[in-house]
Image: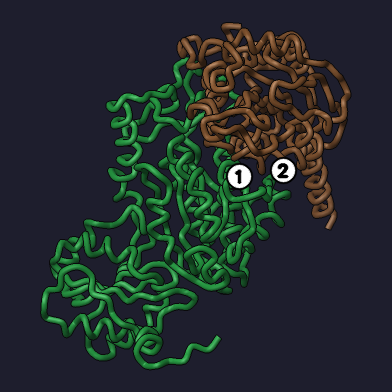
Amino acid sequence: MENLLRMDRMPHIWCPGCGIGLGVTALASALEKAQIDLNNVCIVSGIGCTGRVAGYVKLDSFHTTHGRAIAFATGIKAANPKLKVIVFSGDGDLIAIGGNHFIHAARRNIDMLVVCVNNFIYAMTGGQVAPTTPLAAYATTSPFGCVEPPFNIPYIADSSGAVYVARWTALHVRRLTNSLTEALHKKGFSVVEVISPCAMYYSRINRLGDGLDMMKFYHDNVEIRHGEDTKNLDIGFQTKIICGKFVDKERPSYMERYNQWASEVRGASNES
Amino acid sequence: MKANPKDVLTGVYYIDGDVAAGYGALAAGCKFIGGYPITPSTEAAEAFARVAPKAGALFIQMEDELGSMASVVGAVWAGVKSMTITSGPGYSLMMENIGLGAMMETPFVLLNIQRGGPSTGVPTKTGQADMMQSRWGSHGDYEVIAISPDSPQEMFDYTIKAFNLAERYRCPVMIMSDECVGHMTEKVVIPPADEIELEPRRFYKGPPEEYLPFKPDPDLVPKLARAGDGFNLYITGRVHDERGYPVDKEEFKMKYIRRLVDKIRINKDKIIELKEEQTDDAEIVVVSYGISSRVAVKGVEKARSKGIKVGTLRLVTVWPFPDERITELAKRVKAFVVPEINYGQVVFDVARASHGKANVVLVPHGGAGVHNPDDIADAIEYAVREDKKIEGVVEYKTRLEKLVFEGGYKLKE
């Protein structure tokens, strides 16, 4: 594990009880299990608590602007298709400010693995409401309870064209690792959502206890349903969370299509 | 390093400035453009998209300008020369990741075919009102290079130069053109590849474990690396040390940002390109850039026919600004006349650099058109007659302004 972490940057900034570190652990194990040349792997993050991941992982790593990790990664992939590109960022970064890039990269089927840590809140800025905050949950900017229905991330990914979609919680490290290993070998836009406790802001303002209490909640309330229709994956306030692998399909990636088209253009012009 | 013949469409063309810029990018070895269509710059993107596959390059139409600019910064770090193309509203959206590019010391080129603003403004007609935005548009302190071509031939030539400057100084380079030059069709000669000199990327060649991505060479510019070569790069938009690791301390902030601005400021003599004519014994010097420099020619000729000694100083490079040259000229000329298609942007730098030694006359234009050369001629005549030293910038009132605001001119839609 240590060979995949920038040990000279430890200790990290994450709070006790946070689930992001478990996500990083799962990714590091998956990278070891997947047996890909680590020199060909790069990781891109946006801004926020999860946005700090790129800075702790010892790969070519890019800590970019808020919401733009996927767009930045699209440039990397287009410039050097040999690279395995991982985007590791949070729900606010990828689904709110970066939502447009998320759906379009899925539509194009850009070959990248997107790990989205969903803690239901903007944690870095102190616990504001997010597009993933469950209805009626409290946040500092929804002091009377969230009035907006949240996004169902697997459903957005699926309906936008992702070829691999899974969801786990920070408790399910082994299953999460397996999913990430599988997704690393997938060609195309793959999304793994990681439900994570935010013990500092989300739990506190909603009186849900500490990180361990949240993990107990996941233990008692997660239902694993592989292949479930992504429409049915809404998350309510302290309701059951459905996890599993929901989508695993094949579709030509952007670069595959472009290269095929470009070689046809080149062939045609050679003949003329 | 010479251009690759596969990238150079050698020949004589009759094309517009946008297309010439697209071909220029290709000749410069640009392999990636992430862009979003916007009038009046779209033809440059279209031209590049048509010719890209044969040169092993790629044009991707991103979902918006935020993504376009971010994808360009990403592509550079994956090892290729990259560019984006835009105009006013798109330029505003790109500011976020222009700052990222500056902070990550990423060499890229941005082509801005300026149109009338603010906001949607006059989308199909010309303007020069993004000049200050090109310098200060993204938040925080940074320096960029901005050049302003005035013909399709120059759009080709200076797009290549823009790439060379970007590689040389590891910074964003803006081609601040405008709708007139973008849509003007003229003869463009694309030379053979062996006549095109390219600045190679300053790749680091030592052992990976010793590489420090932000350790500067003596000219303050660090060597570049790319993802995938085993460097375990850590590149961030935060203020960072030479390893690339974030640091929040004020002395690091000072050290890093100081270098970010100084690498352009101390090298400005090598960067700045000016075109000067008849300034030796001039009483008046017309300072202009882009399309305004071509419109000014006629005004200057008219003033000269009346016996006024007028020189011209064309800012091919607008940023960094040629302070020293303006200061020198200010000591011996009576006034500068500055026509620009805005209500005063670059003119204030002319005034700043003249230190009150010469009068500075702005010939403004609201945009959606170019100056009437007679206004420039009249402004020159006014400037030569004016014997008082006037502080700040004098704004010359053009014929159109007088008609619209004073003469009861009926605006017809």
What's the amino acid at mark 1? Answer: Gly
Quadrant location of the C terminus of chain B in the rendered image: bottom right
Residue A104 x %, y %: 72, 43
**Display colour for chain B:** green
Q: Chain of mark 1?
A: B
Kind of residue indicated by mark 2: His
Q: Is residue A31 left or right of residue A121?
A: right
Residue ID for mark 2: A104
Query: Which residue is found at the position 41% from the left and 80% from the top?
Result: B371
Have a look at marks 1 and 2 and say if they share a chain.
Answer: no
Q: Residues within 10 Å of mark 1 (few under 14, many from 20)?
A: many
Q: How is the image coloured?
A: by chain
- The percent coordinates of residue B118 (x first, y second) are 47, 64
- Answer with the quarter of the image where residue B310 lies: bottom left
Q: Chain A is shown in which shade?
A: brown
Q: How many numbered marks appear?
A: 2
Is B45 located above or below residue B63 in the figure? below
Q: Is residue B81 visible?
A: no
Q: Which mark is residue A81?
A: none
Query: Can you tell which mark lies on residue B67?
Result: 1
Extreme residue toward the front, this view: A144
What residue lies at 54% left-to-right and 36% top-to-bottom? A66
* Spot occupied by residue B287 in the image (x, y as percentages of width and height): 30, 70
Q: Nearer the viewer, residue B97 or A167?
A: A167
Q: Element at badge 1?
A: helix
Dots 1, 2 in contact, CB < 8 A: yes
